[in-house]
Amino acid sequence: MAVVGVLALQGSYNEHMAALRRIGVKGVEVRKPEQLLGVDSLIIPGGESTTMAKLANYHNLFPALREFVGGGKPVWGTCAGLIFLANKAVGIKSGGQELVGGLDCTVHRNFFGSQLQSFETELLVPKLAEKEGGNDTCRGVFIRAPAILEVGSDVEILADCPVPADRPSITVTSAEGAEEVYSKDRVIVAVRQGNILATAFHPELTSDSRWHRFFLDMDKESQTKAFAALSLCSSEKDGENMPKNKPLDLPIFE
Ligand SMILES: NC(=O)CC[C@H](N)C(=O)O
């Protein structure tokens, strides 16, 4: 069975470990770069992204995390984890903040305001329901949450939500480079781009395990792809005399 790593520097990693346990999967806590070599997929939890980035720097994790994401293994960022995975983050502390990147989007670090403006809402998630069954909605727990302001063309939007009226207005840079107030009435809160899944909210704090299952399915997909690529590559190498109906990278006891 594939090994799911959970980045365990800070934040809600215990809750992700428990959510995995609930569906019969043993997560592995990851704190050091070399531990990434032993996992097939990785969850980057919510917490506080600046603190998490400082700890990741201290443990020299950024290069290994970038390699992991770039290598195509499934990675899921929740909340602060989403910020980590974004190619661009705005609303960050002065002095900047290191990102892992890989997800073609711009994220606003505290889009929904302060801790006091944390909220829960029902989100419409047809693609999640299509894949994992159940209702067309899921409970979104937003804790001093970020949101995704814009995405690249390869990014699939899995959920958006109305912008709450009590949120402080934020300034964004338009395509033409002008500063303007974010005025759309909805904002993106869950996306997928290939091997990367990102949610601005916290599924690990609810009893709905569909987001964890969705992520594990991404893991299965990626294992199948890796297997197919390996078979293809050995069939190219080994030529026509190999039997066509056997997986080529399994031991042959003949
Ligand atoms: N719950 C969360 O992960 C909050 C993230 C927070 N907005 C940050 O900057 O890191």
Image: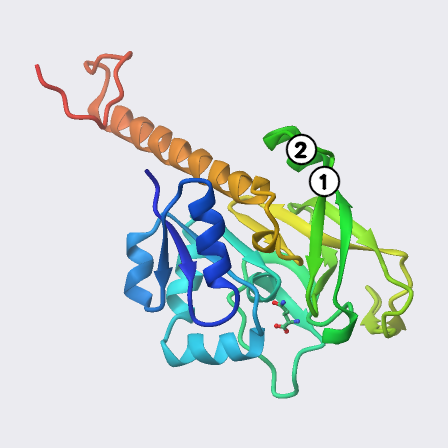
Quadrant location of residue 240? top left
Image quarter hosting the C terminus: top left
Image-based side of 108 in relation to 175, left or right: left
Q: Is residue 89 above or below residue 3?
A: below
* Mark pair 1, 2: CA separation: 6 Å
**Label 2 sits on residue:** 129
Kind of residue indicated by mark 1 = Val
Residue 44 rendering spot, x and y as whole percentages: 50, 60
Q: Is residue 21 above or below residue 175?
A: above
- Residues tagged 1 and 2 counted as in contact (Cβ below 8 A): yes
Q: Nearer the viewer, residue 175 or 88?
A: 88
Q: Residue at x 36, y 76 (%)?
A: 59
Kind of residue indicated by mark 2 = Ala
The image quadrant in which ligand 1 is located:
bottom right
**Label 1 sits on residue:** 125
Image quarter hosting the N terminus: top left
